[in-house]
Amino acid sequence: MIPGMWYAVLESHEVKKGKPVGVTRMAEKLVFWRDADGKLSCLRDLCAHRGAQLSAGRIIHSHIECPFHGLEYDLSGKCVCIPANGMNSPVPDNFRIFSYPCREEHGFVWIYWGEGKDFPEEIPFFDDLDDTKFTCVSIADPWRIHYSRAIENQLDVVHLPFVHHNTIGRGCKTLVNGPVVRASEKEIAIWVTNAVDEGQRPLSQDNIDVAGRTPTVRFMFPNIWQLSVAPNFRIMVAFAPVDNENTVLYLRTYLSSFRPFAFLVRRFPLIIAHQDRMVVQTQRPKKSSLFMHENLIPGDRPIVEYRRIRETLVSRGAVPAEDRQLVIK
Ligand code: FES
Ligand SMILES: [Fe+2]
């Protein structure tokens, strides 16, 4: 996990008023809930009293109540009432639960995974996915693999004619020209120019002109990706890290024309994703890293760039000083 970044971890509509939602994200059990005004809170799903899960409790008076002995917590994770001590007894300071900074933008719930409260204001998102221009529909898809492998699959331009031979990889374009890759610590952009192999040598990226062309794929650190199918048709994925062996993909279809069809085509990314998932879940190790026993080829360059930048960002940041049992890297 790259520390010091905002991660899309849920769709906003998954957290309804009046009902806490318990999920595992970032290798931790978390509870998301809203107060009476709809304000969102993300707490570690572990009561400060004797360790029960708050997500099994209920929301009362804009507080979340533990189902075991009724302790109540506010949005910040501070306990505001211990019923057994009496309503007029002060609550000791140590009755507090770790809370993650959380925000809602573009229909996602984002949490900041890092130290302290000194987080960047800006949430990473694609500037061209103007929410008012597009109709967006979404499907959640669980994968039994570390999120790094799931992301790498979406940067993999070599697999298309094999995994997707009867869908988006039709045409037997097995020869990988380039690919052209522009990578920074914020974003990786890829232009796919695969071709049918007629005995020619693959072009290097320096010999491919992409001036004025929209990248086929864009990935923004730490966990969002976009495929430009057409100017009015995009597929976007948020890779929500669950734990070291699981990821939830939020697959979104964005349409800016033929909007009523958005609902009809929303299963299209799922069909493609399941072709990917079948293979990616077999990869070992389940988590990728910069130095591992794989033999890479020039077409794998986007994956190498992803690993390189991720490694740099991870080593620059500090793992939160919390007493985590399990830290995803
Ligand atoms: S364990 Fe939560 S109130 Fe006791
Ligand atoms: Fe794929």
Image: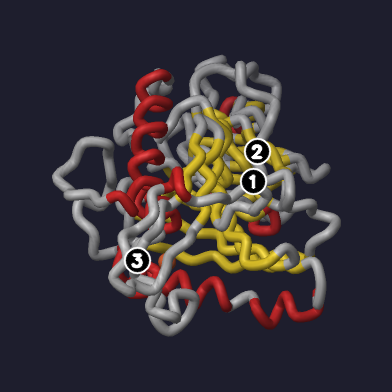
- The Cα atoms of the two marked residues, 1 and 3, are separated by 39 Å
**Secondary structure beneath label 2:** strand
Quick one: SS at disc 3? loop
The residue identified by callout 1 is 109
Q: Are marks 1 and 3 in contact (CB under 8 Å)?
A: no
N-terminal-most mark, 1 or 3: 1
User: Which of the four quarters of the rendered structure image does ligand 2 lie in?
Assistant: bottom left
Q: Quadrant of the C terminus?
A: top left
Spatial CA distance of label 2 from label 3 is 49 Å
Indicate which label's residue lies in the foreground, 1 or 2.
1
Q: Residue at x 43, y 31 (%)?
A: 2
Does the rendering let one see residue 157?
A: yes
Q: Which mark is residue 175?
A: 3
| In the depicted structure, whether residue 19 falls above or below residue 70 | below
Could you tell me residue 83's position as x and y percent? 61, 33
Q: Measured from the top left, where is residue 78 in percent x and y?
A: 61, 25
Taking the view exactly as shown, the residue that stands out farthest to the left is 293
Please tell me how crowded label 3 is: few (under 14), some (14-19), or many (20+) other residues with Cα within 10 Å.
many
